[in-house]
Image (tube, helix red, strand yellow):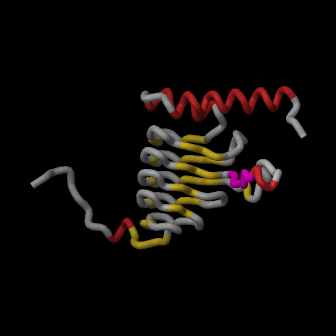
């Protein structure tokens, strides 16, 4: 069943904003475009080039906390669906749930976070990880599927001086 004209127009507008954001080299403009497309992005969060949000352009499914940092190519998947033309079906949603990246979390290059997952405050997700379950606060998670391999608080502190 096709969408009525107004929701279809809003979805198209959000799609254009996301496309522009994905190709915008200026971080402040990129974040402003993503916010206008319906993604919550906290103050001082950094969203790198190549960021992808799969949420069916529904506002509120993807949330990025204050001072969170997303490396290039990170994908936050708030809505998962098969697209198999051989079965004659299109976009049958199998899972739709919020994805939350908490304050101060850090996601490595090409990390993927699946529907319903919360990455805890100050947590680190390694490059290329596929996060299928919640990551606790200050945990270090890596792998496919991602599993907790350490705690940020156990790492030695380093000062700004280099010796």
Q: In the image, 99: left or right of 162?
A: right
- Residue 80 forms part of the magenta stretch: yes
Total numbered badges shown on the rendered structure: 0
Left or right placement of residue 5 versus residue 38 in this view:
right
User: Residue at left 77%, top 53%?
Assistant: 86
Depth check, front residue: 28 or 16: 16
The boundaries of the magenta stretch are 79-84
Considering only vertical position in the picture, is 29 above or below 113? above
Considering the image in quadrants, where does the C terminus appear?
bottom left
Residue 155, image x, y percentages:
30, 68
Which quadrant holds the N terminus? top right
Q: Work out which residue is located at the far front of the displayed protein and give it.
A: 86
Looking at the image, residue 125 sits to the left or right of residue 15; the answer is: left
Main SS of residues in magenta: loop
x and y percent of residue 85 in the render? 76, 50
Residue 22 position in % (x across, y down): 52, 34
Q: Residue at x 74, y 53 (%)?
A: 84
Magenta-drawn stretch contains 94: no
Of 112 and 32, the residue lying toward us:
112
Q: Residue at x 45, y 58 (%)?
A: 128
> Which residue is drawn at the image coordinates 60% and 44% (left, top)?
53
Q: Residue furthest right?
A: 1
Q: Residue 159: x, y in percent?
A: 21, 55
In the drawing, does residue 87 fall left or right of residue 69?
Answer: right
């Amino acid at each position: 069943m096709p969408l009525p004209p107004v929701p279809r127009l809003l979805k198209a507008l959000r799609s254009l904003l996301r496309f522009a954001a994905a190709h915008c080299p200026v971080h402040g403009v990129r974040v402003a475009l993503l916010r206008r497309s319906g993604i919550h992005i906290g103050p001082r969060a950094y969203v790198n080039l190549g960021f992808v949000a799969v949420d069916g352009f529904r506002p509120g499914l993807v949330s990025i906390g204050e001072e969170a940092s997303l490396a290039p190519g990170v994908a936050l998947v708030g809505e998962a669906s098969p697209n198999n033309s051989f079965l004659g079906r299109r976009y049958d949603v199998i899972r739709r749930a919020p994805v939350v990246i908490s304050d101060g979390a850090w996601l490595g290059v090409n990390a993927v976070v699946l529907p319903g997952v919360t990455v805890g405050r100050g947590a680190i997700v390694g490059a290329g990880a596929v996060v299928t379950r919640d990551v606790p606060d200050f945990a270090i998670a890596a792998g496919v599927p991602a599993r907790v391999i350490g705690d940020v608080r156990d790492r030695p502190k380093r000062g700004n001086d280099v010796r």
